[in-house]
Amino acid sequence: MADTNIGAPRPLTIGKIAQGAGIGVETVRYYEREKLLPKPARDPSSGYRLYPPSTIARLQFIARAKRLGFTLRETRELLDLRRASVDCGNVRSRAHEKIIQVREKIAELQRIEGALLRLADACPGVGELDNCPILAALEQGEPDAD
Amino acid sequence: MADTNIGAPRPLTIGKIAQGAGIGVETVRYYEREKLLPKPARDPSSGYRLYPPSTIARLQFIARAKRLGFTLRETRELLDLRRASVDCGNVRSRAHEKIIQVREKIAELQRIEGALLRLADACPGVGELDNCPILAALEQGEPDAD
DNA sequence: CTTGACCCTCAACCACACTACAGGGTTTAG
DNA sequence: CTAAACCCTGTAGTGTGGTTGAGGGTCAAG
């Protein structure tokens, strides 16, 4: 009875999508102001915002990007890649920039992961941890070639 | 003449380590207040802070962690793992928590990377990008099992 | 021995990303 | 029909992570 009716978009109110994404209603309105969400349709009589269910996924994406150290501005740029379908070459090069960014983050996390693993492994059995060469790895990355 | 004299720690002033790490002098003092850096030695006559060169690596680690979405508090916890050498079991379990955190971040970044790659690939040749299933991937992750 | 670059403390200020009212209208369950 | 639960706009406040400035002392070159 629910999945036979695919023609209807069954729009959700702001409270529903906020709850679905695990964030506050105020935050959703904030993201709209900051252009991370497009302006939604409105109920003509009440003025209530009406969202397609896919908005929940979009909000979850924003939350994930945030946890990964992307600013809202950067996250908006990621989301805008899909909208800029007019100029494909541009999208490609922007996407590649973002891919490089993402790969750098992954590499840095992997270095931290390795250091933490070695740290956890080395711990029981040694008394002097303070000048352990393993820990130096935690504090050293590739030299910045900026 | 430089590497034969390993006995001398040749301490650096705050300006030098800030420049070495690519951050501001004020930020270094801020990190000291926030206990991400231990209180450094001081020149007895001038009161100037004197840092061991390894401080630069520590600051670079902080910068990296920040870019990866760790808060200063979380970064301090990472750095404190080495200091807590007293209680090894504790260090191990804390390190494992952090490893799990780091692996989640890596997995999320890899999903984003994959989505971006497919986006860049799919771009030239199609006219309608808006309801492309590839883009749905960018907006969808594993359901939160929180 | 001065002048400019550097350092000190302390306090105020800033941007970002929310979060919480105030003061109102709407919807819905009983 | 009323009361709770929801929604609206707008403005103000919060926490984090710095940044800037005032008012001063210190060091290195000429």
Image (tube, coloured by chain):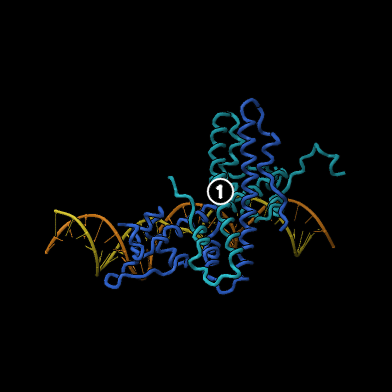
Chain colours: A cyan, B blue, C orange, D yellow
| Horizontal and vertical percent position of residue B45 | 27, 72
Where A55 falls versus A117 (above or below)?
above
| Horizontal and vertical percent position of residue A68 | 58, 51
Which quadrant of the figure contains the N terminus of chain B? bottom left
The residue that label 1 is drawn on is: A107
- Count of marks overlaid on the render: 1
| Horizontal and vertical percent position of residue C30 | 85, 62
Decide which of A9, A73 is in the foreground and name it.
A73
Quadrant in the picture for residue A120 = bottom right
Q: Which amino acid does label 1 sit on?
A: Ala
Q: Residue furthest front?
A: B4
Where B15 falls versus A48 (above or below)?
below
Quadrant in the picture for residue B118 = top right
Q: Is mark 1 on a helix, strand or loop?
A: helix
| Horizontal and vertical percent position of residue B23 | 40, 55
Q: In this view, does B4 lie to the left or right of A12?
A: left
Q: Residue furthest right?
A: A1
